[in-house]
Image (tube, rainbow, N blue to C red):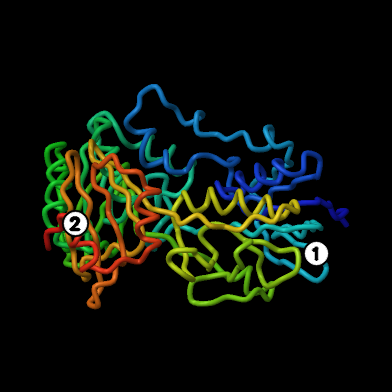
Amino acid sequence: MTAIQHFKYLLVGGGMAADQAAAGIRAVDAQGSIGILSADVDGPYARPALSKKLWVDENFHDEDIDFKTAEKQQAQLFLRTVVTQIDPAAHQVKTSTGQAFSYDKLLLATGAKARTLAGTASQRVVALRSKADYLKIRAFSGQQQTVIVVGDGFIGSEIAAGLAQSNTQVIYVIAGSQLFERKLPTALCQELEQKYTAAGVKFYYQEKAATYQLKGEQVELTLEDGTRLLGDGLVLGLGAEIDYQLAKQAGLHLDKNGVVVDQYLQTSAADVWAAGDIISYPDVILGQTKSEHVKHAIQSGYIAGKNMAGQAAAYTYTPYFYSWVFDISWEALGTVDTSLQLYQEKLTSGQLVYYFDDQGQLQGILSWNAAVDLDHLRNLFRQHPDLKTLQQVLPLKPIK
């Protein structure tokens, strides 16, 4: 029987939250042993670059995204390691191979898994989530090859733009009648789409993928209406699913948003913290909520690490989500939903869009190609101003 390995700090998950948790630990404790258990085949890396910078900066390469976490933080990294059981009472975890680890303090930061379509596994069909996925896409793109992209969220829109700027013919399948129609006002949807069409992207609107099949060195995608599309590769950006099975098995408290943590990111179990996509946390501005964006993973991971190492640090960061494609960049706080009432503030460069509910309460703010201090927007949000109050000080125009 393999001996149980012990670490003072054991991190379950090998993404950006784990990388920053190790940094947070080292900011307080320079000596305590750190073990990182990751199901990935690569150590922690800058995940956003997989759909952004790696496609548009010829001087930036896949090796440049490696954080070198194990080396920098003197941590021991275990790759291709799937944790199947956590026993908080015994302070132990077990893996799919039967290996056991014990700990003094544990972090759960397992993130999410990309949704995919049922079908024959192929190197030419990728639900983009990992560095390994990115390398597969590189292999069937470029050289004027044709790639089909499905999904009108952040991953789908970014990889479609990246491919179009990397000598690739892109067929783009989206569920809506416009790209980001549920988040952006109509004029901004149109401005965004013009960038894609100018780059040669061919849209299929109000369509959903049904099945795919392999045809020699190509992939044939069948849409729900029967339309068949042929490409050299298929990239799926269908969103992600968070697996709470490990947290449930460990008896951690969950609510509708995920694994419940306090302001110090500690779970309901002694000596167990959590960070990133999986947590339900008390945001200082938005209240009890969740966030599945990279800034949240980074900040919550770092604060969790500090707390694990004994420095009481409250998580007070309200994350924003962001995207940039072609020459358009946008960031948003709160709920950005076009079912709300939308008001525009035009700036010298770019604009802000404010989202209000039926009672005139501010729910979200969108910054579009604007050089605006996000902390200023956070401070504005923190005051919870209503529409009438803001109309007295800002030149707001109702839009759709």
Q: Residue 77 in the image: state x and y as whole percent.
A: 70, 43
- Taking the spot 56% from the left edge, 48% from the top edge, the residue there is 15
The answer to which quarter of the image holds residue 20 is top right
- Horizontal side of 100 relative to 323 (left or right) equals right
Count the marks: how many?
Answer: 2
- Horizontal side of 177 relative to 121 (left or right) equals left
- Horizontal side of 376 relative to 61 (left or right) equals left
Q: CA distance from mark 1 to mark 2?
A: 52 Å
- Taking the spot 24% from the left edge, 42% from the top edge, the residue there is 369
Q: Secondary structure at mark 1?
A: loop
* In this view, 173 is above or below 383: above
Q: Secondary structure at mark 2?
A: strand
Tell me which numbered mark, 1 or 2, is placed earlier along the sequence. Answer: 1
Q: Tag on residue 228?
A: 2
What is the three-letter code of the residue carrying label 2? Answer: Arg
The answer to which quarter of the image holds residue 61 is top left
For the residue carrying disc 2, how many other residues have a C-alpha within 10 Å: few (<14), some (14-19), or many (20+)? few
* In this view, 288 is above or below 326: below
- Taking the spot 49% from the left edge, 64% from the top edge, the residue there is 283
